[in-house]
Image (cartoon, rainbow, N blue to C red):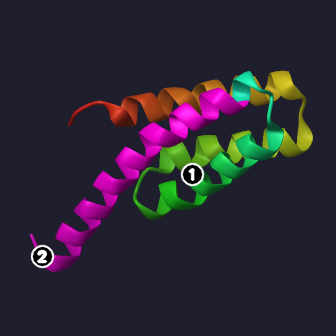
């Protein structure tokens, strides 16, 4: 493994740890119907997920962000369910 691969592996591990915290934040924001916080979490995951190779999370987060901007709270909850599932799967041991 070269230096780049080692560094990317470290960054992916950090992303996984952050994703666990983001999942908890997202659950709390959904419970409070806090659209600003939901958008903020989704926006961060949308960008960083793709950078670190977690395209499923990136795409799901993008759909949540769009739902906040264009849909009602039920649409946000529906899209967030997919993102929450992807985040939960990411938290599982390798």
Q: Is residue 10 magenta?
A: yes
Is 56 rendered above or below residue 24? below
Which residue has dot 1 on it? Answer: 45
Residue topped by disc 2 = 2
Q: Is residue 38 above or below residue 45?
A: above
Residue 38 location in percent, x, y?
72, 41
Judge the density around disc 1: few (<14), some (14-19), many (≥20) Cα neighbours within 10 Å. many
The range drawn in magenta is 1-29
Instruction: Please give left or right for residue 55 compared with residue 78 in the image.
Output: left
What residue sits 20% from the left and 37% below the top? 94
- Dot label at residue 74: none
Between discs 1 and 2, the one toward the N terminus: 2
In this view of the protein, which residue sits in the foreground, 63 or 41? Answer: 41
Residue at position x 32%, y 63% in the image: 11
Q: Which residue lies furthest to the left in this view?
A: 1
- Which image quarter is the N terminus in? bottom left
């Amino acid at each position: 493994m070269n230096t780049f691969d080692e560094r990317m592996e470290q960054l992916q591990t950090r992303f996984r740890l952050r994703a666990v915290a983001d999942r908890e934040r997202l659950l709390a924001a959904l419970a409070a119907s806090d659209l600003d916080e939901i958008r903020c979490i989704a926006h961060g995951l949308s960008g960083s997920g793709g950078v670190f190779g977690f395209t499923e999370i990136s795409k799901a987060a993008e759909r949540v962000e769009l739902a906040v901007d264009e849909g009602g709270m039920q649409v946000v909850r529906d899209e967030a369910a997919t993102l929450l599932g992807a985040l939960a799967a990411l938290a599982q041991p390798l």
